[in-house]
Image: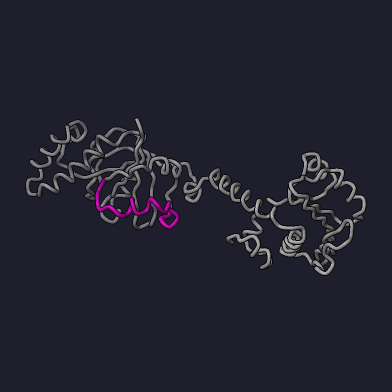
Amino acid sequence: MSRRAWAIKLGSGGSCVGLCERHSIVGMGWQDIESSIAAHASFDELWKEMREVYSDRPDGTISMWTGQLYRFAQVCSSGDYVLYYDPPRKTVRVCRVTSEPFYRDFETDIELDVWHCRQVEYPVEPILILDFYGPLKGKLLGPRLGFWELRDCFETIDALAQGKRPHVIAAPDAEIQTAYAHLRDLVTRRLEALDATDWESLVVDYLQAQGAHVNESEIGGSRPIIDVEARFDHGELGEEIWRVQVKRYQDQKVDWPQIESDLKLVGEPRFCYVSAFGFTPEAREKADAKDVLLLEGGDFALFVLGGKVRDSLKSKLSLPTL
């Protein structure tokens, strides 16, 4: 049997919330309808009983009341979720039904219209209405009924009951990761279309965004090893220098022998190697052991989408910014 989710109004302005939570129940009114009839009669039989007991009410009201009590007592099942709004506390409570319907068997010191009941458990703490999952708010707060179904919501509410946060329910981590991986691939393909000079400019923009000082008059040129030199000022901790080699071998990954040959000529500064088309597995393994930082197209994707690159690159890439 597929599980369902429901919403209930516990008294005007939440007046019955306190009683229900003290006894771990949710409940409805209609004191003069016998529990056995509510739980076992057919819809038509329950309607006739309602019609007889509340003879001063119009047929439309009788039909509405019958539908609500019938759903509460017979359609709602153990294991279903029931949600209610607590207006004074501005919170939503998620309950899980744990019993068959029963008639209230305890007295109260105040008169409250709670008679037909279901035992419940509370799998999660109350959720502030401001933090509640947006698409459910209208379904919970909108209808002017006593008990109604939240259609096609069981899995979402089950996630809330497990303590998952609304943004994760709306777009699970796996979906975000898949979408970002696809977007990253698209941006990387556009970056691969840049020429060698554009790549040097991209790397400079990236380093400067990290707080580096770069003399752009010394970028590239005829020097065999260093395309970019970046200086990071760490105040009292002194200055750190990075030397960067930028390669754009069309459709070709950079291998370790190339990196190793350049590394011997770098000197004391830290070494960063940028390859528009990536690196071989051997290059990655050995660069890690030698503390050489490797960057490729995909590593710049989020930075480019952030819109921090120079206008000439924005124009060439024609990408939206986040």
Picture residue at 68% right of the left edge, 67% below the top: 312
Q: 250 or 124, which is in the foreground?
A: 250
* Image coords of residue 193 (percent x, y): 69, 55
Q: 259 or 33, which is in the foreground?
A: 259
**Quadrant position of the C terminus in the picture:** bottom right
Picture residue at 61% right of the left edge, 61% below the top: 318
| Residue 214 drawn above or below residue 144 | below
Q: 302 or 193, which is in the foreground?
A: 193
Picture residue at 18% right of the left edge, 46% below the top: 64
User: Does residue 221 appear to the left or right of 52 in the view shown?
Assistant: right
Report the number of discs. 0
The answer to whether residue 192 of the structure is visible from this angle is: yes
The answer to whether residue 141 is magenta is: yes
The answer to whether residue 217 is magenta is: no
| Residue 54 drawn above or below residue 43 | below
The answer to whether residue 322 of the structure is visible from this angle is: no
| Residue 274 drawn above or below residue 24 | below
Say how the picture is coloured.
one colour
**Quadrant position of the N terminus in the picture:** top left
User: Does residue 6 appear to the left or right of 281 in the view shown?
Assistant: left
* Image coords of residue 197 (percent x, y): 77, 61
User: Does residue 152 appear to the left or right of 75 in the view shown?
Assistant: right
* Image coords of residue 213 (percent x, y): 79, 67
* Image coords of residue 163 (percent x, y): 48, 44
User: Does residue 30 appear to the left or right of 161 in the view shown?
Assistant: left
* The magenta segment: 128-147
| Residue 316 drawn above or below residue 189 | below
Q: 1 or 246, which is in the foreground?
A: 246
